[in-house]
Image (cartoon, grey):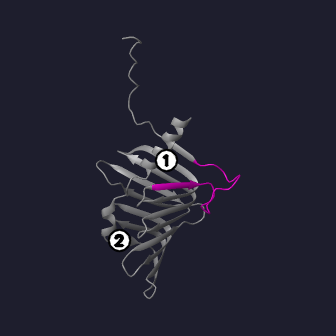
């Protein structure tokens, strides 16, 4: 049992592999149907088929609230309409074709803290060469990219509550073939 728990913890750590850090230095391009801007508070409210692209990061939702600090850090809150989800997809740092993607009814992204939170019907998947390698499902998922730490809770409040449901962790096999046969004893 301890080995299974250790494998689950290691998988959570690998799921939290760093997002493409160069994305934060690229321009953000946002497509939308409607936009309201408040220059004093540096707040932008975008509605209708919102698609935000910044480097390899793509975020999609029905509505987005984008704020920018005087230092230039963005925070984005994506919300979805009834029966829909907001989504994101981003290349992970490292060699190869490695991506992380997620969805939830609400997604909050804080660039300064490098923190993403997914609320209600949250799913985060890790893909390598188009193949699912890990998946997390829960009512709430947060991921601290700076510390490479993930947390999953059974309630959208960010807390685990008795009777609040259960999360799911899917761990895909890393090896592609059967284990080598063991050598006979005494040889």
Q: Quadrant of the N terminus?
A: top right
Height in image: 100 above or below 6?
Answer: below
Is residue 137 left or right of 49 when viewed as pictured?
A: right
**What residue lies at 49% left-to-right and 55% top-to-bottom?**
150
**What residue lies at 37% left-to-right and 56% top-to-bottom?**
18
Residue located farthest toward the front when viewing the structure as drawn? 186
**What residue lies at 41% left-to-right and 79% top-to-bottom?**
69
Residue located farthest toward the right when viewing the structure as drawn? 163
The answer to whether one can see residue 55 in this image is no
SS state under label 2: loop
Q: Earlier in the sequence, mark 2 or mark 1?
A: 2
Where residue 186 sits: x, y (%)? 39, 11
Q: Name the residue under label 1.
A: 135
The answer to whether one can see residue 130 in this image is yes
Region of the chain picked out in magenta, as a range: 149-167
Rendered image: mark on residue 28: 2
**On the image, which quarter does residue 24 sit in?**
bottom left
- Specify whether residue 154 is painted magenta: yes
């Amino acid at each position: 049992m301890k080995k299974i728990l250790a494998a689950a913890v290691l998988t959570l750590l690998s799921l939290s592999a760093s997002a493409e850090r160069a994305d934060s230095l690229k321009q953000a391009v946002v497509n939308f149907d409607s936009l309201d801007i408040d220059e004093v508070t540096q707040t932008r409210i975008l509605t209708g088929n919102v698609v935000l692209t910044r480097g390899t990061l793509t975020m999609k939702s029905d509505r987005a609230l984008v704020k920018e600090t005087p230092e230039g850090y963005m925070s984005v809150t994506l919300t979805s309409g009834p029966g829909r989800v907001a989504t994101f997809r981003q290349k992970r740092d490292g060699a190869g074709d490695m991506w992380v993607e997620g969805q939830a009814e609400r997604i909050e992204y804080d660039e300064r803290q490098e923190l993403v939170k997914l609320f209600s019907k949250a799913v985060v998947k890790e893909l390598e060469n188009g193949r699912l390698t890990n998946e997390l499902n829960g009512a709430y998922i947060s991921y601290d990219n700076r510390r490479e730490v993930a947390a999953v809770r059974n309630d959208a409040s960010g807390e685990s509550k008795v009777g609040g449901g259960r999360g799911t962790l899917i761990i895909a096999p890393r090896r592609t073939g059967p284990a080598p046969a063991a050598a006979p004893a005494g040889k």
